[in-house]
């Protein structure tokens, strides 16, 4: 299953001082997303099912030599796709600084290789932060435990806590209240996923401003327990109506995914990436969407 390959620690070492540890932060998709209320703090309450997928970044850390001339305790280098040039303000660094405020951590070099596209609704930044917490806990024997790591992660972002375990979860509140989900693993196991990320940056703030707030008649948690071929008519992302009006191109991507044989297709989060569930491996997403980033895998 997708989430079984998400949390992997690789260790390379000659001795403890020069140990290098690597993890692979995974992306997530939203199986349905309903905006159900407006909070007094200005945020919105939502309901969604977070589901991890095997599209991953790579994150490694190693000790920084005491003589290395760095002004920061977590020296981060980012390579790959969707590079965030503001490395000092990256969530990986924020995760390190958050733990360092409570624990004595040595200085580290961190290398983040990005494959998960940014501004996509796939949770890449949140995943990187959560996996940094796990990596520091494992490397420096902090013995935090899952619940404590989730509490730290929640301070960095609404969906960060999900990525501590990266197992399917029904999320409520602002996405920070997590409950176990059953049956959807069996529903998706053995199917294929395709990801299409257009060169469009959707403003989350703008998406929320135009969304319709309404509690659905049936929760997405209930719907995903049903056969996938029933999802198209009942499982919805409330952001799609507002975002499609601003970016009609995105509606065309969803329509084309269905024309290519998708059993279910949806924009993930507030976009702009789309995922599609197929019974057979899709082989033509790249040629069909030449101006987009694409990814396919078995679930």
Image (cartoon, rainbow, N blue to C red):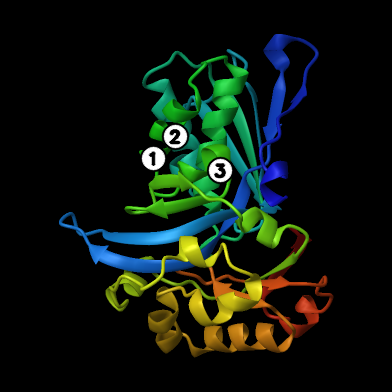
Q: Is residue 96 visible?
A: yes
Q: Residue at x 56, y 38 (%)?
A: 165
In the rendered structure, find residue 227 and report the number of the disc placed on it. none
Residue 43 spot, x, y in % from top left: 25, 58
Residue 92 spot, x, y in % from top left: 51, 38
| Residue 138 placement, left or right of 203 | right
Marks 1 and 2, how far apart at CA: 6 Å
Q: Residue at x 40, y 32 (%)?
A: 152
Viewer-closest of 245 and 262: 262
Asked where in the image residue 21 lies, by quadrant, the reply is top right
Q: Establish if 63 lies above or below 265.
A: above
Q: Establish if 162 lies above or below 141.
A: below
Viewer-closest of 156 and 14: 156
The residue under label 2 is 150
Q: How many numbered circles are shown?
A: 3
| Residue 236 placement, left or right of 10 | left
* Discs 1, 2 touching: Cβ within 8 Å: yes
The residue under label 3 is 128
Q: Establish if 139 lies above or below 233.
A: above
Marks 3 and 1, how far apart at CA: 13 Å
Q: Is residue 269 visible?
A: no
SS at mark 1? helix
The residue under label 1 is 154
SS at mark 3? helix
């Amino acid at each position: 299953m997708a989430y079984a390959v998400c949390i992997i620690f690789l260790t390379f070492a000659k001795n403890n001082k020069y140990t290098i540890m690597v993890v692979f932060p995974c992306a997530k998709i939203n199986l349905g997303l309903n905006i159900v209320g407006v909070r007094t703090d200005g945020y919105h309450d939502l309901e969604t099912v977070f589901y991890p997928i095997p599209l991953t970044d790579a994150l490694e850390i190693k000790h920084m030599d005491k003589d290395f001339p760095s002004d920061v305790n977590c020296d981060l280098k980012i390579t790959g796709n969707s590079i965030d040039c503001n490395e000092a303000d990256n969530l990986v660094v924020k995760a390190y600084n958050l733990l360092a405020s409570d624990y004595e951590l040595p200085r580290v070099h961190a290398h983040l290789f990005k494959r998960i596209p940014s501004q996509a609704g796939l949770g890449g930044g949140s995943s990187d932060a959560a996996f940094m917490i796990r990596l520091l806990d494992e490397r420096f024997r902090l013995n935090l435990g899952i619940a404590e790591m989730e509490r730290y992660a929640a301070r960095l972002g609404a969906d960060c806590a999900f990525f501590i375990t990266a197992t399917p979860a029904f999320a409520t509140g602002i996405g920070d209240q997590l409950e176990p989900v059953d049956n959807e693993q069996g529903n998706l196991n053995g199917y294929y996923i395709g990801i299409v990320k257009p060169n469009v940056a959707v403003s989350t703030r703008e998406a929320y401003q135009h969304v319709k707030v309404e509690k659905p008649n049936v929760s997405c948690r209930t719907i995903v327990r049903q056969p996938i071929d029933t999802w198209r008519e009942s499982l919805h992302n409330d952001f799609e109506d507002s975002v499609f009006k601003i970016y009609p191109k995105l509606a065309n991507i969803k329509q084309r995914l269905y024309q290519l044989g998708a059993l279910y297709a949806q924009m993930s989060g507030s976009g702009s990436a789309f995922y599609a569930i197929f019974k057979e491996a899709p082989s033509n997403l790249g040629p069909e969407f030449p101006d987009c980033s694409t990814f396919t895998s078995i679930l």
